Image (cartoon, coloured by chain):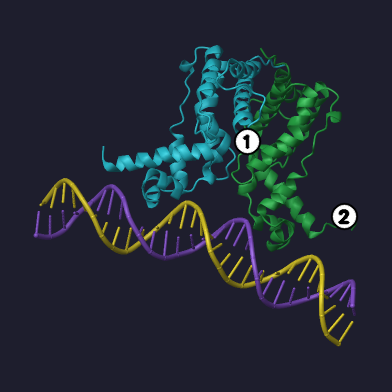
Chain colours: A cyan, B green, C yellow, D purple
Amino acid sequence: MSTTQNTRDLLLSQGQRLFWGRGYSNVGLREIAAAAGVDVALVSRYFGSKQGLFSATLEALDALGPSDFPDEDALTETIVHLFVTAPRDGDEPSAFNMMLVNARDPDVGEMVRKAHQEKWQNALEAVIGDSTRATLFMAAVLGFALAEKHLRLSGLGAPDGAEYAAQLRHVLRAALDYEPA
Amino acid sequence: MSTTQNTRDLLLSQGQRLFWGRGYSNVGLREIAAAAGVDVALVSRYFGSKQGLFSATLEALDALGPSDFPDEDALTETIVHLFVTAPRDGDEPSAFNMMLVNARDPDVGEMVRKAHQEKWQNALEAVIGDSTRATLFMAAVLGFALAEKHLRLSGLGAPDGAEYAAQLRHVLRAALDYEPA
DNA sequence: AAAAGTGTTCAACAAGTGTTGACTTGATAC
DNA sequence: GTATCAAGTCAACACTTGTTGAACACTTTT
């Protein structure tokens, strides 16, 4: 690999970390470039624009496949494991946080919603077998993350304890148990 | 006439509408002033700063009192009614949307979290009788709003139909039914 | 009539944004 | 040796942001 690939990757990883952690409009190109230790102009050179860089980070979103989760229980436990082991600084650049922080952005919101639809929603519907339950499931996941990490509500158990996991499991199961009229 | 709003009130109401709908950092003072039909400089004049104007809009957050909701059922139905009758443009300036859009803002996030704690969380705990269930309840409400209005997920029923209300009722009840280990 | 006070307008500021183009650098190929 | 070409640097652009202070118009007070 050439040096080009190195700085390009540096910009990409730092861009992902900052965009996914603090939100597209709250991060400037100069901050990303400084974190990568390179010049700002290289963003335009390699990615065309700020939106181009963000779009490139979106490709790192893991695409869920139906084969990843044999059934709903495995899916639930994967989510629970993700939450329990997630870092607990306020700007955690996880995929969930990325959705929460960028879904409504005027510049990249549409991109984010599209990525969610393509990479997650369809796969969730395949595993869960129903579009409504899949949406409620996603709502439960994001609501839990929002309450804990953004509003920083108290009332939840310590993230490394059994109670925290039980609470998350409870709301996820409730979403999966919904019966259309 | 008697409802003749002075300039301060005009700025306040337009500021609330835009801040609560699109988020603090996505709205400029010039846009607010233009919507109110006055000059930008009047914001500094009457509210000191942009943050001062936002802070003033926060005082319009309805403080929930324990007397507002005799029991959990009344609380649930109030929330359901709020969702069913909420306007459906993308920038609805409801109190829920205000939380979703501004809770993580670097400038006003702390203000928002504090307002939530003072005006809602304590009252919810009083009605629900448990801090954990109150937090899960709030998470369910915000997750539902986020999925529908921000991610614009399909899979939920039409907002004016019975199924939509049933879905919301289901996840709210699940939060209230949580039993700590 | 003069003075003081009030609400408003206007132009400008300093700081920040994403983006661009000209330039230097360094290695490779002719 | 020289030309070539990509990689990186640097300064500046045009634009937007929140904020400020001087000036204006108008009413009220002295």
Q: Quadrant of residue A97?
A: top right
The one of A26 and C1 positioned closer to us in this rendering: C1
Left or right: B30 as drawn, with respect to A72: right
Left or right: B42 as drawn, with respect to A97: right
Q: Are marks 1 and 2 in contact (CB under 8 Å)?
A: no
B52 is higher (above) or lower (below) than C23: above
Q: Please give the label number shown on residue A87.
A: none
Question: For the point 71% across and 28% down, which residue is it?
Answer: B158
- Residue type at tag 2: Thr
Question: For the point 26% across and 37% down, which residue is it?
Answer: A1
Q: Chain of mark 2?
A: B
Q: Secondary structure at mark 2?
A: loop
Question: For the point 46% across and 35% down, which residue is it?
Answer: A58
Q: Secondary structure at mark 1?
A: helix
Question: For the point 63% across and 24% down, which residue is it?
Answer: A140
Q: Quadrant of residue A13?
A: top left
- Residue type at tag 1: His
Q: Please give the label number shown on residue B3.
A: 2
Q: Chain of mark 1?
A: B
Residue A99 at x, y = what percent? 55, 33
Residue A157 at x, y = what percent? 62, 21
B48 is higher (above) or lower (below) than A70: below
The one of A41 and A154 positioned closer to us in this rendering: A154
The one of A122 and B61 positioned closer to us in this rendering: B61
Residue at numbered disc 1 = B150
